[in-house]
Image (cartoon, helix red, strand yellow):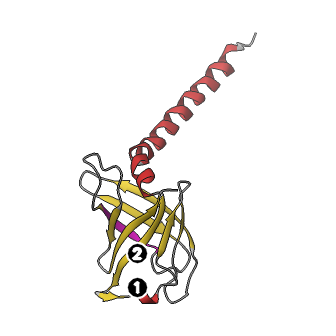
């Protein structure tokens, strides 16, 4: 006679494994949820330098729009590349990072991110600075969307 409890126990084991794996995958994102909320909205690019040269006049517009779903609308540099992209904020013990991905857009890369104002809990941020070794961008919030 076959034990019918065995398949049920086996499926419960896999259910627990799946739940633990999902929890482990979501933990890094919950820490950055407040950072994601702080960046969502429209930002004007006040200053942008590439290799030390001001390139603001080469942008198709000076507006960045971060959507909560991880979508970003980017200006084009000399009208090249895609204006649509994705973004994510990450943290380690010392820094925050902004990763922007887009097809052939000059602004799509891995940045170090800094909040330039806001309260002690880094909320109500209205000025940001993100940079790489070659790209340096300062922005001011236009609106929270």
Q: Does 141 sit left or right of 129 as displayed?
A: right
Helix, strand or loop for the magenta stretch, by majority = strand
Q: Is residue 28 left or right of residue 18?
A: left
Q: Residues within 10 Å of mark 2 (few under 14, many from 20)?
A: many
Residue bearing mark 2: 45
Label 1 to label 2, Cα distance in Å? 8 Å
The x and y percentages for residue 44 are 43, 72
Give whichever of 44, 12 is nearer the camera. 44
Tell which residue pokes out farthest to the front in this image: 142
Residue pictured at 45% horizontal, 51% vertical: 37
Residue contact between numbered discs 1 and 2, judged by CB atoms under 8 Å: yes
| Left or right: 24 as drawn, with respect to 18 | left
Residue 69 vs residue 40, the one in the foreground: 40
Magenta part of the protein: which range?
A: 108-114
14 sits to left or right of 101: right
Secondary structure beneath label 1: helix
Give the answer, above or below, for where 71 lies relative to 23.
below
The residue drawn where x is 41% and y is 53% is 38
Count how many numbered circles sit on residues in the image.
2
Magenta-span inclusion, residue 110: yes
Which residue is the site of mark 1? 56
């Amino acid at each position: 006679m076959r034990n019918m409890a065995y398949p049920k126990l086996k499926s419960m084991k896999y259910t627990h494994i799946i739940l633990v794996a999902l929890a482990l995958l979501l933990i890094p994102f919950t820490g950055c949820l407040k950072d994601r909320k702080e960046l969502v909205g429209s930002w004007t690019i006040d200053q942008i330098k590439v290799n030390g040269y001001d390139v603001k006049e080469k942008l198709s517009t000076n507006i960045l729009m971060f959507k909560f779903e991880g979508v970003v609308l980017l200006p084009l540099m000399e009208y090249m590349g895609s204006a649509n992209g994705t973004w994510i904020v990450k943290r380690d013990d010392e820094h925050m990072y902004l990763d922007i991905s887009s097809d052939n857009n000059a602004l799509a890369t891995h940045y170090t991110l800094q909040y330039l104002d806001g309260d002690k809990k880094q909320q109500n941020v209205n000025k940001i600075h993100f940079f790489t070794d070659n790209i340096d961008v300062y922005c001011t919030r236009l609106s929270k969307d």
